[in-house]
Amino acid sequence: MALIVQKYGGTSVGTVARIKRVAKRLAMLKDRGDDLVVVVSAMGHTTDKLLDLAHKLNPLPAERDYDMLLSTGEQVSIALLSMALHAMGYKSIALTGAQAGIQTDSTHAKATITNINTRSLRKYLKEGNIVIVAGFQGVDKENQITTLGRGGSDTTAVALAAALKADWCAILTDVDGVYTCDPRMVPEAQKLDEISYDEMLELASLGAKVLHPRSVQVAKEYGVTLHVRSSFNMKPGTLVKEVKDLENIRIVSGVACDKDAAKVTLMAVPDKPGVAATIFSALGDAAINVDMIIQNINRGQTNDITFTVDESDLDKTVDAVKKLKKTLNFKGVVTDNNTAKVSIVGAGMFSHPGTAARMFRCLGDAGVNIQMISTSEIKVSCLIERKLAAKAVKALHKEFELEQS
Ligand code: ADP
Ligand code: ASP
Ligand code: MG
């Protein structure tokens, strides 16, 4: 008898028929004698629809209201899944994040899970329930509802698997596993049988939304093996785990694309010690993640500082930097949300000099201009014009011979 955590994404619980299918899949595991904790996302595009509603009333909603609203989506699906299981004669209980003991910090809209009190979860499991937990949400010390960032239900599942010391954690989604690239962008992409935590973390952080980046971080930290697979068939998917087989390290394992990158330039910032610290501390305090950064030396005593943020943080970013205008005395702020970031990821590039140059040449040959570059030991990212993203991704996928043979 195993203790299994399974997570079903929005598409997998998008209709009544699909909820019934998920219930049948859970019933099969329960009949086998396994203990089950199931995390579900909001149905279909519910979260996007809730966001649209919010923005119709207020372009910059208060973060407490944002979390209050967005957390309702998952509450609908846990209740419906439990009803489906009861109708089939199975014992189950639906729990919100708070009821499941999921505590977070107070960073609304991007909260981090700080602790999981597993007492109730264990009690309900012992009573024979299939325990259904709302993904993407928790509660802070003041009992305020928080959400974990878009796609955060994956993190709920992995954190629960770690806290309960589950035998494994399955992420059931609408593709057969982790591919060398988003199969919706590149139909020739190949499914990977396994991938290391580090490579998966880079891919997820760089736009491969098949897993929430934080879920991979938690899995690595607590040694939780993830099985990413389809909820629509029983095919084996991709194992995300520690890969020690140095012989089989690929130079490039995958290509990722983030179409939501936005570029911000602060013009003519005085060239003085401490200026960058002031700017990026203010952004950090506003919980804005900054990605690529470039400082251009101008003639005279000023620099232009350009950086990228997620487009959903653009208004907040402009707001935060404008507040510094008087103190820092820079000339102005220019934004560009017509950009995308394309990246190659692979543990083997570390020992293969020339991989970055090969990427730049490939983009050049495809007529794609590179606006910014960032690198780590296992990835190279380029900021490019958004409308060229699909072309760039396809060219890179081909260049690094990732296509199905
Ligand atoms: P869920 O609702 O199940 O959480 P998501 O939409 O968040 O599903 O993630 C699954 C989607 O991730 C797929 O439909 C696919 O388009 C996209 N995706 C992006 N990059 C990859 C990749 N490298 N491998 C597999 N899927 C990817
Ligand atoms: N429903 C949330 C979202 O759409 C969380 C998730 O699906 O993981 O972002
Ligand atoms: Mg997801």
Image (spheres, rainbow, N blue to C red):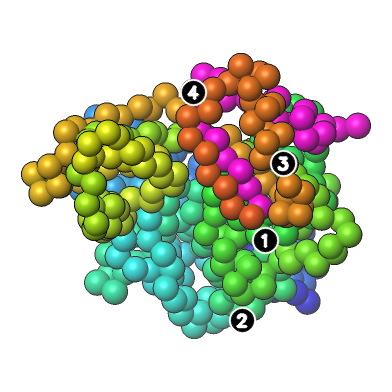
In front of the other: 237 or 250: 250
Spatial CA span between label 3 and label 4? 22 Å
Instruction: Give the residue at x 67% y 61%.
Output: 197
Answer left or right for 54 relative to 123.
Answer: left
Instruction: Give the residue at x 82% y 34%.
Output: 401
- Three-letter residue code for mark 1: Tyr
- Three-letter residue code for mark 2: Lys
* Camera-nearest label, 2 or 3: 3
Residue receiving disc 3: 355
* Camera-nearest label, 2 or 1: 1
Residue receiving disc 4: 385
In front of the other: 120 or 209: 209
Question: What percent of the width, then of the height, locates residue 398?
Answer: 77, 28
In front of the other: 136 or 16: 136
- Cβ atoms at labels 3 and 4 below 8 Å apart: no
Residue receiving disc 2: 126
Beta carbon of the mark 1 residue lies under 8 A of ligand 1: no
